[in-house]
Image (cartoon, grey):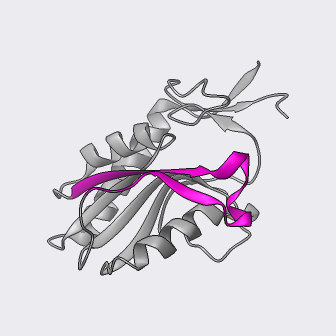
């Protein structure tokens, strides 16, 4: 399948460093738990954690949907839940891409019941133009309005995650 570079590894590295500085300044000495949303965010999460000058706790979640249904139908579940408490701590959800916002809205609602101080979202790619629910990406890496993208953790049928940049797949469904 043909692909076109959208963000190369150098552009991504520079932006991740900037986000690391912003997040570190925002949370400074506050208790912070950074939560990687698997699978897609794992590369971004690892690089972002190394870019921080603070030392947050880290955890992972993975969302799944029943029988391929979307979160619009309220069918989302955790296939991997967090293992540490977020009570009275700030939470930073680290996602690969936020487009319609349904998954992030679901996740923030679930985590809100665990009494964190705050919940913020960092995403490698923010497709705000596609948003269907009221959700804000507090720390966007890049904004994009169209294109089916892969690489740097993002996949198409579990392929392309290992690419060192973000690419648009040409001719995808």
Q: Quadrant of residue 133?
A: bottom right
Closest to the observer, 9 or 43: 43
Magenta segment:
57-83
20 vs 42, left or right, is left
The residue that appears at 18% across and 74% down in the rendered structure is: 30
- The quarter in which the N terminus is drawn is top right
Closest to the observer, 67 or 89: 67
Asked if residue 74 is among those painted magenta in the image, a careful observer would answer yes
Closest to the observer, 113 or 97: 113
Q: Residue furthest front?
A: 67
Instruction: Residue 122: give x, y in percent of width and height.
Output: 45, 59
Asked if residue 76 is positioned above or below residue 48 in the image, the reply reads below
Instruction: Residue 136: give x, y in percent of width and height.
Output: 56, 72
The residue that appears at 49% across and 26% down in the rendered structure is: 164
19 vs 3, left or right, is left
The residue that appears at 24% across and 67% down in the rendered structure is: 85
Instruction: Residue 28: give x, y in percent of width and height.
Output: 19, 70
Instruction: Residue 73: give x, y in percent of width and height.
Output: 74, 65
Number of callouts: 0
- The quarter in which the C terminus is drawn is top right
């Amino acid at each position: 399948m043909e692909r076109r570079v959208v963000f190369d590894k150098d552009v991504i590295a520079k932006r991740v460093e900037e986000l690391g500085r912003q997040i570190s300044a925002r949370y400074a000495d506050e208790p912070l738990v950074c939560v990687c949303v698997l699978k897609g965010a794992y590369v971004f999460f690892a690089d972002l954690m190394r870019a921080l000058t603070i030392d947050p706790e880290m955890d992972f979640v993975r969302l799944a949907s029943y029988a391929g249904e979307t979160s619009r139908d309220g069918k989302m579940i955790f296939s991997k839940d967090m293992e540490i408490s977020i009570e009275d701590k700030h939470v930073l959800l680290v996602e690969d891409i936020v487009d319609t916002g349904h998954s992030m809205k679901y996740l923030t609602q679930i985590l809100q019941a665990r009494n964190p101080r705050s919940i913020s979202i960092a995403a490698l790619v923010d497709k705000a133009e596609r948003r269907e629910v009221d959700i804000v990406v507090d720390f966007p890496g890049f904004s994009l309005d169209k294109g089916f993208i892969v690489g740097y953790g993002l996949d198409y049928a579990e392929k392309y995650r290992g690419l060192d940049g973000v690419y648009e797949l040409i001719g995808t469904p």
